[in-house]
Image: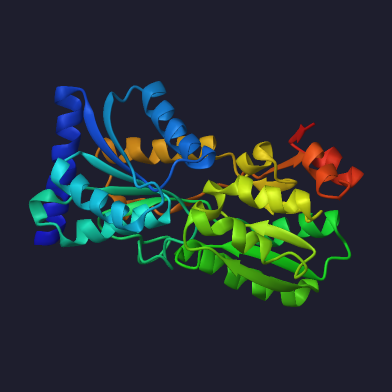
């Protein structure tokens, strides 16, 4: 009961600050700069602005360095912001770990976004019962639909390469799911890992000759160095598919993924509920359901594949 009253008191203080002073302070821990995560932040900020929430932001970027993300998490606790927002799994883990070590008077609600599996990442206890201080929006992909899209492009695919950072909990969960799907869908998985962006090009080259196509999950390290992977794909006629649609504009063949601006917008709606007094414990983890199919025709030609007419017809957007 005492713990519940403490949480309620913190949330009432947050609401009073918003209602009285008119402005809330929001600290942001973003793991790295790339179009998808930048779009999340923009969507988040736009929702709050469009819905009457006056906010000031302290935006921190870890530049894909886990040590820096940890330092930012600790710094955010000291900033005494009204709400802590973490964009991508590594930053969310760092922020939640800092929160767990913080004294009671410094604890604040944490809202994560662009996190694939918050349970596997240790952020929440369960999707429907996230815990006292932490909740958010997951970008968990329906991988079966994505694999069906890739196999429509290449019905004869036997080996699918997957490029990821083995240190990212999201990516490990995705690869595990891919391996399960591969058994029923008739292909095998060839793995290549890169611990940092400088390793991405060599990891991509290691897949040449080992697979018929490459899939890039929502892995921050790989997406940050996407151009290195696309170079390998073009040079070797090896089609590169991505999990996020922003990568298609950059030169991936296709993706069946989310609009990350909308993802951030949805996160903003959750933030408004918390700002107005809702406890994170009462807000189950949300998922984005609106999938988009985007195809880059120029990239497909450069990597030696022809988009099937059925997918051209279904595409939300075509890049020429």
Image check: 231 left or right of 148? left
The foreground one among 319 and 148 is 319
Q: In which quarter of the image is residue 268?
A: top left
Rendered residue at 50%/54% (across/down): 197
Residue placed at 41% from the left, 51% from the top?
A: 64
In depth, the one of 52 and 224 nearer the eye is 224
Scheme of colours in the image: rainbow
Q: Where is residue 192 in the image (x, y as percent from the top left)?
A: 61, 68
Examine the rendered structure and indicate whether residue 220 appears above or below residue 97.
above
Q: In which quarter of the image is the N terminus?
A: bottom left
Q: Residue furthest bottom?
A: 183
In the image, is 65 to the left or to the right of 147? Answer: left
Q: Residue at x 70, y 66 (%)?
A: 207
Rendered location of residue 68, percent (x, y): 30, 52
Give the percent coordinates (x, y) of residue 134: 30, 54
* Residue 152 located left or right of residue 203: right
Please provide percent x and percent y for residue 196: 47, 58
Give left or right: position of 39 versus 76. right
Q: Looking at the image, can residue 47 be seen?
A: yes
Quarter of the image where one finds residue 13: top left
User: As displayed, is residue 14 above or below residue 190?
Assistant: above
Disc tally is: 0
Q: Residue 285: name its quadrant.
A: bottom left
Identify the image quadrant of the C terminus.
Answer: top right
Q: In this view, does 41 lie above or below 241?
A: above
Q: Residue at x 19, y 39 (%)?
A: 81
Residue 217 appears in the picture as rendered: no
């Amino acid at each position: 009961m005492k713990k519940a009253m403490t949480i309620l008191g913190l949330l009432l203080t947050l609401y009073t600050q918003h209602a009285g002073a008119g402005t809330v302070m929001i600290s942001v821990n973003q793991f790295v700069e790339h179009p998808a995560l930048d779009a999340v932040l923009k969507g988040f900020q736009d929702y709050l602005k469009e819905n009457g929430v006056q906010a000031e932001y302290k935006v921190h970027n870890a530049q894909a360095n886990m040590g820096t993300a940890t330092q930012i998490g600790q710094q955010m606790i000291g900033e005494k912001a009204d709400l802590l927002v973490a964009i991508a799994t590594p930053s969310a883990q760092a922020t939640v770990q800092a929160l767990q070590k913080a004294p009671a008077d410094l604890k604040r609600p944490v809202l994560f976004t662009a996190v694939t599996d918050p349970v596997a990442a240790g952020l929440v206890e369960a999707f429907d019962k996230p815990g006292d201080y932490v909740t958010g929006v997951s970008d968990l992909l329906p991988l079966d639909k994505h694999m069906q899209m890739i196999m429509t492009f290449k019905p004869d695919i036997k080996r699918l390469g997957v490029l990821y950072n083995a240190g990212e909990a999201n990516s490990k969960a995705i690869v595990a799911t891919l391996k399960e799907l591969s058994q029923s869908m008739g292909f095998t998985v060839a793995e290549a890992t890169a611990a940092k962006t400088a390793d991405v090009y060599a990891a991509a080259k290691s897949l040449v000759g080992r697979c018929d196509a490459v899939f890039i999950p929502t892995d921050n390290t790989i997406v940050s160095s996407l151009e290195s992977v696309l170079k390998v794909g073009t040079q070797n006629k090896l089609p590169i598919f991505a999990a996020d649609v922003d990568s298609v504009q950059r030169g991936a063949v296709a993706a069946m993924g989310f609009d990350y601006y909308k993802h951030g917008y949805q996160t903003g709606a959750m933030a408004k509920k918390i700002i107005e007094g809702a406890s994170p414990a009462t807000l189950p983890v949300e998922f984005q359901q609106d999938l988009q199919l985007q195809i880059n025709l120029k990239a497909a030609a450069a990597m030696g594949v022809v988009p099937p007419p059925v997918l051209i017809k279904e595409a939300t957007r075509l890049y020429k």
